[in-house]
Amino acid sequence: MPSLSEAFREDPLHLHLNKLLDFNSIQELPDSYAWTQIGEHHTTINPNFPSNSCHGDENVPIINLNDPNAPKLIGNACKTWGVFQLVNHGIPLSLFDDIERTGMALFSLSTHQKLKAARTPEGMSGYGRARISSFFPKLMWSECFTIVESPLEHFIQLWPNDYTKHCDVVVEYEKVMKKLAQKLIWMVLTSIGISKEELKWAGPKDGPKEACSALHLNSYPSCPDPDRAMGLAPHTDSTLLTILYQNDVSGLEVLKEGVGWVAVPPVPGGLVINIGDLFHILSNGSFPSVLHRVLVNRTRQRFSVACLYGPPSNVQIRPHPKLIGPNRPALYRPVTWNEYLATKAKYFNKALSSVQL
């Protein structure tokens, strides 16, 4: 069975890691990082709103997992927004503290030390720029560290004498996030009438064991000119769903149809859950794969951890038969996550259109 890492080896992206900045030493925004306007990207924005505006008249839903109506609320949020914030999820807050300490320890290392664990063009794991960087004319004010499978090899390079504790944190964090992702997926599927017997690959027996996942640790350093910089350019995720932990520094925004860009401010102890392209396909278009971006801050460093959760690499994702009918034909052809990653590497935000029937 091909692994997630193998999918990236087949579609290398050259991100010029030798040009990575020492962000803390920069007093003025370099031209290569200066976006002429924050809306400078390859997507269509609602013409009724400026592309660099945020709107407070609508807010991303915040859902309490202990609420008896949580499955219904989650299903509705997925249909109307493609994203929601989750509180009272049962994950110890100490685990977030631990993963944040590991991430901040990593990003505070010297550039020379971080580049010892640099991601290769053919790989997904390691230190570098966001993988989407190659699709934009300007660079993003951020750095990331991606972990697929074990972090051991890279962490030994970063902390030769102190890697064990950081490895343990990452392994525990990923295990807990995969378990939560599995629970949320079934809440969403139940909301549209799909049972565990009807989607065996995602069932409780094999789902968590065979599912693919990756972690992105992201740092958005303080920026001397945040109005002209972009932390992470607008994109959708290739996943079934993504679980994001963010520290107490704002910056995440999502695009809501008919509204414009909406800020997703950090909620203490909360997690941001967003639908990815594969769940959009599985739902036959019922759940939007939400376009999102990250802005930067003049004085504070933003940190986040994204858990990208997908199906087993050999499973074909297709519109579920229950969501197909005489008046709603299948909108997408079947595709595995590995195949879709290759499509995403070629077409980026037009990938969904390329697998449309």
Image (cartoon, rainbow, N blue to C red):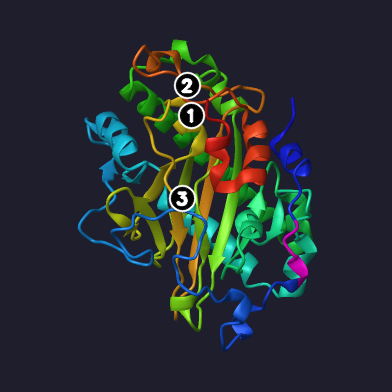
| In the image: residue 209, left or right of residue 152 | left
Earlier residue among tags 1 and 3: 3
| Front disc: 1 or 3 | 1
Q: Which mark is residue 281?
A: 1
What x and y, as percent, mark residue 254?
38, 54
| In the image: residue 81, left or right of residue 173 | left
The magenta span reads 14-18
Q: Which mark is residue 327?
A: none
Q: Spatial distance from mark 3 to mark 2, Cα to Cα?
A: 26 Å
Q: Is residue 339 magenta?
A: no
Q: Is the N terminus in the top left, top right, bottom left or bottom right quadrant? A: top right
Please name the residue shown 29% across and 39% down the image: 80
Viewer can see residue 21: yes
Which residue ends up furthest to the left in the rendered image? 57
Q: Do the CB atoms of the residues marked 1 and 3 lie less than 8 Å apart? A: no
Q: Do the CB atoms of the residues marked 3 and 2 lie less than 8 Å apart? A: no
**Badge 2: residue crowd in 10 Å (few <14, some 14–19, many ≥20):** many
Q: Amino acid at mark 1?
A: Ile
- Magenta region's main secondary structure? loop
User: How many numbered circles are shown?
Assistant: 3
**Badge 1: residue crowd in 10 Å (few <14, some 14–19, many ≥20):** many
Q: Spatial distance from mark 1 to mark 3, Cα to Cα?
A: 21 Å
Q: Which mark is residue 319?
A: 2
Q: Amino acid at mark 3?
A: Leu
What x and y, as percent, mark residue 153?
78, 51
In the picture of the structure, the residue carrying the numbered disc 3 is 244
